[in-house]
């Protein structure tokens, strides 16, 4: 298993002896679709250890967990026919809505927090009274919201640190795939 999985978005190339159609069928049979339900500890229907979706030549997989971690990695892949089977190009990333939400969070924290922080700093430095209330709140909260926007995804990835290896091994076993030779080695 000598593959570097430490960086999100780095491409992983696998080769399977299955045709693309057989590969897609094998993945579909081995995962549960992401259908929400109230009557499951994980929040999703089914009992497979992997959730996701498989389209004609793409897939997205995530590990089933029994707690909420929107920053845990998902395995995104695309596969195509090659001599002797299929070529799978895959990478790890968070879900699209999480990326969008974090961009909105950081933009909002910066756009709304910057004026509050600047006015609070001016109040401290010049003795003016542009803000009401405790000046420390205006000096601490806006930078803390921006820092939290960077810290929360890292914390989520830390809690999901075993998911990358688990998902890659799952794909290797499910579709009889091997990692392309020459892949970066793990430290």
Image: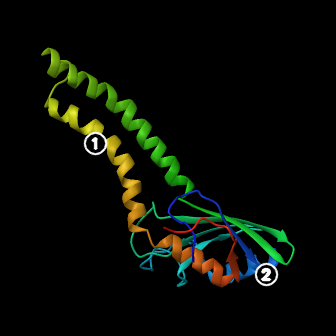
Q: Which quadrant holds residue 70? A: bottom left
For label 2, the SS is loop
Left or right of 152, for residue 98: right
Residue 79: x and y in percent read 75, 68
> Closest to the observer: 87 or 31?
87
> Closest to the observer: 148 or 185?
185
Q: Nearer the viewer, mark 2 or mark 1?
A: 2
Q: Which quadrant holds residue 142? A: top left
Within 10 angstroms of label 2, few (less than 14), some, or many (20 or more) residues?
some
Asked if 175 appears above or below 68 in the picture, the reply is below
Q: Which mark is residue 168?
A: none
Q: CA distance from mark 2 to mark 1?
A: 50 Å
Q: Which mark is residue 17?
A: 2
Q: Are marks 2 and 1 in contact (CB under 8 Å)?
A: no
For label 1, the SS is helix
Residue 54: x and y in percent read 69, 70
Residue 126: x and y in percent read 15, 14
Q: Residue at x 52, y 74 (%)?
A: 165
Left or right of 48, for residue 172: right
Q: Which mark is residue 144?
A: 1
First of labels 2, 1 by sequence position:
2
Residue 31: x and y in percent read 61, 79
Left or right of 124, for residue 86: right
Is residue 47 at least partly visible in the picture? yes
């Amino acid at each position: 298993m000598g593959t570097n999985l430490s960086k999100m978005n780095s491409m992983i190339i696998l080769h399977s002896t299955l045709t693309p159609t057989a590969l897609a069928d094998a993945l579909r049979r081995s995962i549960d679709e992401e259908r929400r339900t109230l009557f499951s500890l994980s929040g999703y229907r089914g009992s497979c250890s992997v959730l996701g979706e498989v389209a004609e030549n793409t897939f997205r997989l995530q590990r089933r967990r029994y707690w909420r971690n929107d920053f845990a990695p998902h395995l995104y892949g695309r596969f195509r026919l090659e001599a002797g089977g299929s070529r799978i190009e895959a990478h790890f990333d968070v879900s699209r809505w999480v990326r969008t939400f974090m961009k909105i969070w950081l933009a909002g924290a910066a756009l709304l927090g910057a004026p509050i922080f600047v006015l609070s700093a001016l109040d401290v430095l010049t003795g003016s009274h542009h803000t009401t209330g405790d000046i420390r709140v205006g000096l601490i909260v806006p930078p803390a919201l921006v820092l939290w926007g960077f810290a929360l995804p890292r914390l989520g990835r830390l809690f999901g640190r075993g998911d990358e290896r688990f998902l890659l091994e799952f794909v290797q076993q499910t579709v009889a795939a091997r990692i392309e030779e020459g892949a970066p080695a793990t430290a």
